[in-house]
């Protein structure tokens, strides 16, 4: 159990360190053009339909004159058209997005490995208890009550798995008692 957990955490740590190293290399260079853009939303104007324009320009050049190409209106209407357009400079950090996705995938991967581990080890750990049977009818429940049962407080140890198994057995007994009560009441009413 410790080796599979350790392996997944080692993988996650290596992935995070790799991303941070890549982030440091990219940070020393200029920003990528995919991380910044100017977005202009121009509504319909006269006989021209509305349109959204995206362009990779600097923040100071983020206006209608630099982004809207080709200009859909003739020269004397450009100023009126550009006053209707709303331009916004947008910036994102793709490295932060990558780190977030890697952390998310690492957690999901660790949980999947843990689930696989439990699926493989659970049948080996679980002990078959012949006294635990599903309740089919009243006769089965009466036969089960007559069988001697060991004292659970002395048989169970202190490990977490044994405590969970003990709680599971108590829950199964409660469910069987509830089923017996329901079936008895059902037979009395009918």
Image (cartoon, helix red, strand yellow):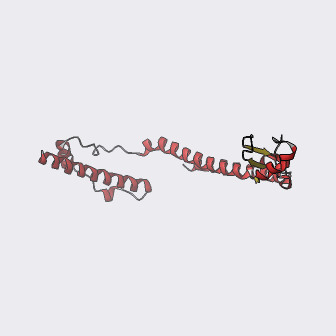
Given residues 74 and 71, the one toward you in this image is 74
**Which residue shows up at 27% across the image and 45% down it?**
131
Specify the quadrant of the image occupied by residue 46: top right
Given residues 189 and 15, the one toward you in this image is 189
Residue 7 visible within the image: no
Residue 139 visible within the image: yes
Q: Position of residue 16 (x, y in %)?
A: 70, 51
Q: Is residue 173 left or right of residue 103?
A: left
Q: Is residue 127 left or right of residue 93?
A: left
Q: Is residue 187 left or right of residue 62?
A: left
Q: Position of residue 147 (x, y in %)?
A: 21, 48
The C terminus sits in image quarter = top left
Specify the quadrant of the image occupied by residue 136: top left
Q: Position of residue 163 (x, y in %)?
A: 39, 56
Q: Position of residue 137 (x, y in %)?
A: 19, 41
Given residues 81 and 168, the one toward you in this image is 81
């Amino acid at each position: 159990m410790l080796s599979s957990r350790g392996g997944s955490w080692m993988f996650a740590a290596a992935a995070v360190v790799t991303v941070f190293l890549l982030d440091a290399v990219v940070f020393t260079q200029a920003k990528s053009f995919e991380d910044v853009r100017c977005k202009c939303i121009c509504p319909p104007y006269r006989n021209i339909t509305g349109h959204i324009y995206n362009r990779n320009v600097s923040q100071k050049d983020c206006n209608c004159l630099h982004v809207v190409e080709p200009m859909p209106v003739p020269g004397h209407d450009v100023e009126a058209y550009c006053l209707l357009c709303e331009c916004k400079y947008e910036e994102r950090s793709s490295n932060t997005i990558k780190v977030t996705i890697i952390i998310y995938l690492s957690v999901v991967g660790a949980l999947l490995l843990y689930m696989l581990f439990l699926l493989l080890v659970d049948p080996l750990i679980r002990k078959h208890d012949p006294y635990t049977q599903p309740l089919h009818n009243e006769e089965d429940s009466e036969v089960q009550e007559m069988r001697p049962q060991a004292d659970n407080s002395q048989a169970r140890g202190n490990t977490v798995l044994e405590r969970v198994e003990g709680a599971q057995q108590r829950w199964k007994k409660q469910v069987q008692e509830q089923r017996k009560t329901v079936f008895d009441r059902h037979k009395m009413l009918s």
